Amino acid sequence: MTQENGLAKRIDGKAFAASLRVRIGKEVERLVRDHDLKPGLAVVLVGEDPASQVYVRNKGVQTLEAGMNSYEHKLPDDTNEADLLALIEKLNNDDSVHGILVQLPLPKHINETKVINTVHPDKDVDGFHVVNAGRLATGQAALTSCTPVGCVMLAKDTLGDLSGLEAVVVGRSNIVGKPVAQLLLQENCTITIAHSRTKNLEEVCRRADILIAAVGRPQMIKGDWIKKGACVIDVGINRIDAGNGKTRLVGDVDYQDALATAGSITPVPGGVGPMTIACLLRNTVQAACMIKGLDLPDL
Ligand code: NDP
């Protein structure tokens, strides 16, 4: 692994995601040419949350750039649950739609779990459906949550074979912590999942050859929690006061502090974040291939 001036190598998720999107675009061209198959992604947004609107817009733009069809469904904040479920059923039965993503969080009056489990598992490009979580846990082919897939791709690109490495995942959410631990287990890592009740968290973190931080606490993980030379993948996205009347984004790891001990580290922004949409596009291509009975492309 290359290290400059004794400092950790910066893992460039933005560049990796851009190259992945190019590969996806080429695969889409091939599917259109050889199989008359143009993958389509439907994104459903309920309400006016500004951050969600930005995410949905970016997803739409990148889907079109990859040569796929993008369908956006924007519903008002007071949409009732039955109407949302009816729209999902319609998309489940629409042959031009291969992936369905319902942007979270949903308004409080809508049951998120019910919505997630109404998406057909074969079109569940977010990988949140209980069937896909079960397939992942049992080692069957599954659509897997985008951020965890992105984390493992970056770790493999940085370290190569992960077999036998100690991986510590801080955070046990269904959308990041648990699936990223499952994926690392599939890569033959030895896994520890830490959370808010973990004792001696600093010591647990110091065991890690690969440290995944998915906590949602700004700069919580300090440099001396990190084993010398470890690969640190920071999933956290936290907005903090920048001190000049503005705000800035930071991760769950204290990046500057970590540079001296880590061997490699993802920055925030520009690390895991860009991988999430690229992996969503990848999942949409995979879903389209699975639905059509084609072999899965190696992306
Ligand atoms: P959740 O809030 O769902 O989960 C946070 C986890 O961190 C929980 O398991 C919690 O433990 C654990 N935790 C909280 N405080 C501590 C603590 N002091 N010590 C140890 N563990 C703690 O968050 P998400 O998994 O949804 O997201 C995590 C972060 O990743 C957020 O910053 C989010 O914005 C970001 N994110 C980034 C994405 C991207 O595209 N880059 C995508 C998704 C999320 P417990 O279970 O015990 O409560």
Image (tube, rainbow, N blue to C red):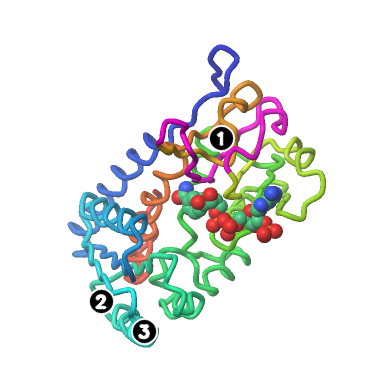
Three-letter amino acid code at the position of disc 1: Gly
Question: Is residue 166 one of those drawn in magenta?
Answer: no
User: Which of the 4 quarters of the picture holds residue 133?
Assistant: bottom right
Q: Is residue 174 above or below residue 238?
A: below
The residue pinned by badge 3 equals 80
Q: Secondary structure at mark 3?
A: loop
Three-letter amino acid code at the position of disc 2: Asp
* Front in this rendered view, residue 48 or 120: 48
Question: Is residue 229 one of those drawn in magenta?
Answer: yes
* Front in this rendered view, residue 77 or 29: 77
Label 1, label 3: how many angstroms apart (C-alpha)? 48 Å
The residue pinned by badge 2 equals 95
* Front in this rendered view, residue 173 or 191: 173
Ligand 1 within 8 Å of the CB at mark 1: no
In the figure, is residue 120 to the left or right of 225?
left
The residue pinned by badge 1 equals 160
Over which residues does the magenta segment extend?
218-245
